Amino acid sequence: MKYAPIIIFVYNRPDHTKRVIDSLIANKEASDSDLIIYSDFAKTEGNLKKVNEVRSYLKEIIGFKSIRIIERGENYGLAKSIISGVSEVIDQSESVIVLEDDILVSPYFLQFMNSSLEKYENEEKVASIHGYSYPMDTTNLDDTYFIRGADCWGWATWKRAWQYFEPDGEKLRDQLIREELVARFDYDNTYPFFQMLTDQILGRNNSWAIRWHASIFLKNMLTLYPKESLILNIGLDNSGTHCDDNGYLSQTFSSKKKHNFPSIIQENIEARSRMVTYFRSIAKHQIKKSSPFLKIRVFLRKIAGKLRRILMRMIDVLHSSQTKAEIIFSGNYSNWEEAANICSGYDSDIIIEKVRDSLQLVRDGKAIYERDSVIFNEIQYSQPLLIGLLFASSLSGGKLKVLDFGGSLGSSYYQNRKFLSKLKFVEWSIVEQEKIVSIGKSEFENREIKFFETIIEAVKLRKPETALLSSVLPYIKNPYEVLGLIKSFKFQTILIDRTPFFVEDFPDRITIETVPPEVYSAQYPAWFFNYSRFLDFLSDTYELVEAFESNDRYSLIDAKIIYRALIFMRKK
């Protein structure tokens, strides 16, 4: 058997490091293995003593074929340490085994790693070997199984696979969205891996592991897992990076000596299904109900009554040059493409120009209000949206920082600016398609309102706290992926407005919306949503503060519809 070099990354935990080394030495293969240790430098003066303690201990280690210690002269941090260290060693070796200073290993860990590396050395589909198995139900599972992607607690890989590591998280995120893989990447929306990747892009974490997982997942490559864990993470005591003891990951490791390998190199569907069940069970245990939300609901209902008396007027009055025209929804299509192929389509340039012309009049005070390119002689307020915006500002001391996804050239901004003008601070960031952004930048931007082509760009520059999606989700091919993306940015509040839901428990439906020529001649697919599913999708990280009926009044022939406005607040 060939023995891959072992890399250990250590920092300032002498006791943890000693326990990890002792567990490795208990493997009989240790004496035939080269050990490379990367010791990171102290981040602060306060860490220096512990770093030096670790380095003194490292010089005493025996029991391996060879030992090489690399002492960094500056603080790399975990991500840079691992990325650079693995790359350096793998340049000289075809395979590596990787540990951190909080991963205890079974006496049979090295046997499993080396035998697996040897067996799958030339299997391009297999990217890595993992020593940890999640504490899910493993009844009747095989000794080992494959799962798409990669992992980070006691792992091994080959030079041929490590070449696919992509350090640019934004590239990975964009590809996941483009290939419509976000839900699958998140194990059917049961664990927030996509959010972890988004947080890495935004600098909220510096995880190398989420990028490694995403890189291999996008290559459709596999990692081999043991049925029973061969490692134990002892860093879940808040002493490590990105680790805390949540009670759902810690477990003892297996004493199994030998493992049978899968007969077929493909993802184990049953194992993946059980991982989904496990992740879902974690989410249920971690949901916390908080009484302040009850107080918020009472408050919102009170101001809703007052605002209704102030704001509600005749709202369907069109400009004298217009006649009222009805939008029609029809059909029940199995997928977006089927509906799109039937639609007659629309001229997006003409629609954009109509919206542009109408909003220019509103901007310059020559018209009162615009919606969907139509000019009104009175502002058609969305009372629930205004409540949501004022509520969001109250959470931030009278400041309002909105990300308006699909916000056109500022329709919602101009609709509500009268009531927002007295706030301490307003920033309105619109994310739209390239042509609208170009027009917005040249003709509509001011100190408050700015235009962006991506959410990332807006978040990095302006750090919005409230996400607004008004009449947007029904017209997106993959609305839940967009909603998942919005969720991943951890906005303090999410406001959903003018969005249609079934009154009864019907599944999500794709229809065709027909817009009459009086507005602009168009046909395109449109979603109607199951209300319970929609709420469940956000319930892991957001609490529904209040639900209102929107002003829209459209219907389907065979089902009752309510257009809703929803106010969500992120759970603590």
Image (cartoon, grey):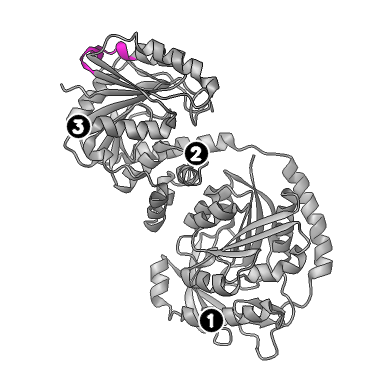
Front residue of 241/269: it is 241
Residue indicated by mark 3:
94
Front residue of 47/417: it is 47
Q: Residues within 10 Å of mark 1 (few under 14, many from 20)?
A: some
Q: Is residue 1 above or below residue 373?
A: above
The quadrant holding residue 229 is top left
Residue at image coords 29%, 47%: 219
Q: Classify mark 3: helix, strand or loop.
A: loop
Q: Is residue 419 left or right of residue 532?
A: right
Residue furthest to the front? 73
Which percent across, then down, holds residue 412?
65, 68
Which percent across, then down, holds residue 45?
53, 22
Return the disc, 2 or 3, that comes first in the chain's sequence. Answer: 3
Which percent across, then down, holds residue 81?
38, 31
Residue indicated by mark 2:
205
- Cβ atoms under marks 2 and 3 closer than 8 Å: no
Which percent across, then down, holds residue 113?
26, 25
Specify the segment rendered in magenta: 24-33
Q: Is residue 381 left or right of residue 82?
A: right
Q: Classify mark 1: helix, strand or loop.
A: helix
